[in-house]
Amino acid sequence: MSIDKLGHELIVDHDAVPGLMDAMTMPYPVSDNSMLTQVSPGDEIKADIAVQANSAVIDQLEVVKKATPGDSPAQVKPIHIPEVGERVPDFALTNQNGKRIRFGDYRGKTLLITFFYTRCNLSDYCPRMNSNLAQVDKELAKDPNLYAKTHLISISFDPAHDTPTVLRSYGAAYTERYVKEDFRHWEFATAQPKELKPLADFFAVFYEPDATSITHSLSTAVIGPDGTVKAWYSGNRWKPEEALQAVNAATASSERSRVASSQPAST
């Protein structure tokens, strides 16, 4: 077991839950954040899971065996937290058309990104992230002027499986345009492992593949037209309206700066 305090989750390597799921490693939100302080990495726990329509949450837990130094996970480097105002590197991706794209291609637009993988079957994880972006996309489309100044990218951390063909099919289902989708406003992309790792590290994304799935964290960010971080959301508790407000604010701020810079200097 390990702890993701940013996402308010415990990453648990658990036995099979009869009638619910096979043995696997996966992150679980906790119903009370104080639980995160009751455990240490490597502890063995007994927990009750509250299953709702779209989520499975650890509701009660008991530490049955404390970790010894040999049981604790190896030390890892500190997590990089994207800071508001921090410049985003010009990361490279490959989109659903097999085209190479870079973050710098969208300079001048407000960019909303999230991370996912298409095989994720936890409805409150990757599917929720893309459902949230779908809601933002629909709201932005109501204002053609704002729509033209914004762009969305969903980034897969499963390049071995999420090929351009897979991304096209998956993405078109979320945009609800299917065969008519041109992905001009919302792209689905991935990167090769050597390019993906620094990108994921910058946005505090943890992902660890196993035989059947990927244990991962969630990360969503708003990047301003100037290429700097304007907002960052860890986990799945953010709402579409929050991201929409951040996108609107970043776009409006950039427009005000553009207008101000175009005015002649007073004498």
Image (cartoon, grey):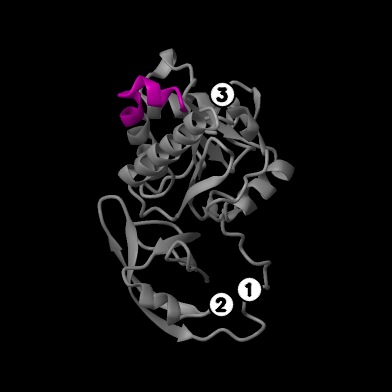
User: Distance from label 3 to label 2 (Cα)?
Assistant: 39 Å
Q: Residue at x 51, y 55 (%)?
A: 217
Locate residue 132: give its quadrant: top left
Q: Position of residue 59 (x, y in %)?
A: 30, 70
Q: Residue at x 48, y 16 (%)?
A: 182
Query: Do tag 2 and tag 1 residues touch (Cβ < 8 Å)?
Result: yes
Kind of residue at disc 1? Pro
Q: Quadrant of the C terminus?
A: top right
Tell me if I can see residue 221 in this picture: yes
Closer to us: 219 or 156:
219
Q: Residue at x 39, y 30 (%)?
A: 174
Kind of residue at disc 3? Thr
Residue that numbered label 3 is attached to: 165
In the image, farthest residue toward the left: 53
Vertical relation: 119 (above or below) 48: above
Vertical relation: 213 (above or below) 247: below
Local crowd at mark 1 within 10 Å, few (<14), some, or many (≥20)?
few
Q: Position of residue 57 (x, y in %)?
A: 33, 63
Local crowd at mark 2 within 10 Å, few (<14), some, or many (≥20)?
many
Locate residue 69: give its quadrant: bottom right
Which label number is shown at residue 73?
Answer: 1
Query: Do tag 3 and tag 1 residues touch (Cβ < 8 Å)?
Result: no
Residue that numbered label 2 is attached to: 42
In magenta segment, residue 77? no
Q: Secondary structure at mark 1?
A: loop
Question: Magenta part of the protein: which range?
Answer: 138-149
Compare marks 3 and 2 and give the one earlier in the sequence: 2
Q: Main secondary structure of the magenta part?
A: helix
Q: Secondary structure at mark 2?
A: loop
Compare marks 2 and 1 and give the one earlier in the sequence: 2
